Image (tube, rainbow, N blue to C red):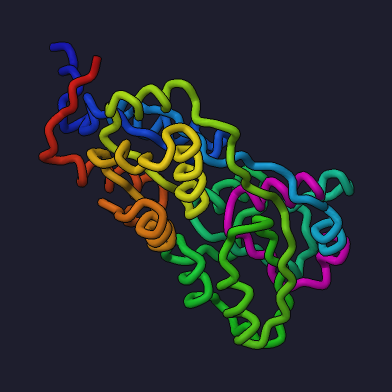
Amino acid sequence: MPAPLSSAADRPLLGRRIAITRAESQLGAARQLFEAAGADVVDLPALVVTPPDSWGPLDDALEEWDAFHWLVFSSSNGVDAVEERLRRQGRCLAHRPRSLRLAAVGRKTAARLEELGAPADFVPPAFVADSLVEHFPVSGWGLRLLLPRVQSGGRTLLAEAFAEAGARVVEVPAYETRCPASLPTAALAALEQGRLDAITFSSGKTVRHTAQLLDAAFGGDWATRLEDTAIVSIGPQTSSSCRTALGRVDAEADPYDLDGLLQACISVLQGRPLRAQP
């Protein structure tokens, strides 16, 4: 007998229109995951990843990378930026000094290191910075840590916590995330027609930038465009930004990654009527 067609259980988001607000360069993986679950995905890139204002601090730190004990990455953007600058110097993460260990927050960050042939020496059990600090495998006392990070808007928790533990921490801007100029045409149309079942957020900046883009597109009453749309967050800090900028959050991922974001969407939309789609 032929294999049965995919059922609603196989594609739980069938008939749902979901907006994804990740950086434009990172939409592919999220789109693939949500479309496999049946969703009609609307790209709403709320971040543009760009170089920092100056490469000097990162380049200077990497010139002395053999003086650090740990290189700590909190995003795959940081991994890519460091690898790019190292390659310009004829080096790479895969051939780092033996004394330099790598830590990664999150599966995606760890997976990017794997792809580069430089697997992380430590990945915390929960995919947030707080978990890395709590579960770090050695005492911070006397360690020298290099933390490449977003130029603006990122949390300073890692640097502060490790400094309190007696580590010497060097934070350097490795990239910047800026707000796009405007909403894409498809996203604008979906919002104008009230045809979004859910909108997902993967960072505090995606929340703030989306609010900025909506205000520019619809004016002071932009929040009404989301009244019947589920607000879904990838983790606690993003949820906090949702409450501040959007007034609510309807679901939060667990675990704090794309798979968790997908499951949160499925859960929050269960029982809600399908919206009429033209």
Q: Is residue 104 above or below residue 212?
A: below
Q: Is residue 250 magenta?
A: no
The residue furthest top is 1
Q: Is residue 69 magenta?
A: yes
Lateral position of residue 58 relative to residue 150, left or right: right
Q: Is residue 84 above or below residue 93?
A: above
Q: Measuring from the top left, give residue 130's x and y in whole percent.
A: 48, 71
Residue 36 occupies which quadrant of the picture? top left
**Relative depth, front residue between 39 and 7:** 39
Residue visible at 16% across and 32% down in the picture: 9
Magenta stretch: dominant secondary structure? helix
Does residue 256 appear in the picture of this structure?
no
Residue visible at 24% across and 32% down in the picture: 13
Q: Measuring from the top left, give residue 225's x and y in whole percent.
A: 32, 36
Q: Measuring from the top left, give residue 197's x and y in whole percent.
A: 26, 34
Residue 186 occupies which quadrant of the picture? top left
Residue visible at 61% across and 86% down in the picture: 164
Q: Is residue 255 above or below residue 178?
A: below
Q: Measuring from the top left, give residue 127's x and y in whole percent.
A: 45, 60
Residue visible at 22% across and 26% down in the picture: 14
Quadrant of the rendering where the C terminus is positioned: top left
Quadrant of the rendering where the N terminus is positioned: top left
Q: Is residue 82 above or below residue 197?
A: below
- What segment carries the magenta color? 62-85
Lateral position of residue 265 relative to residue 53, left or right: left
Does residue 174 appear in the picture of this structure?
yes
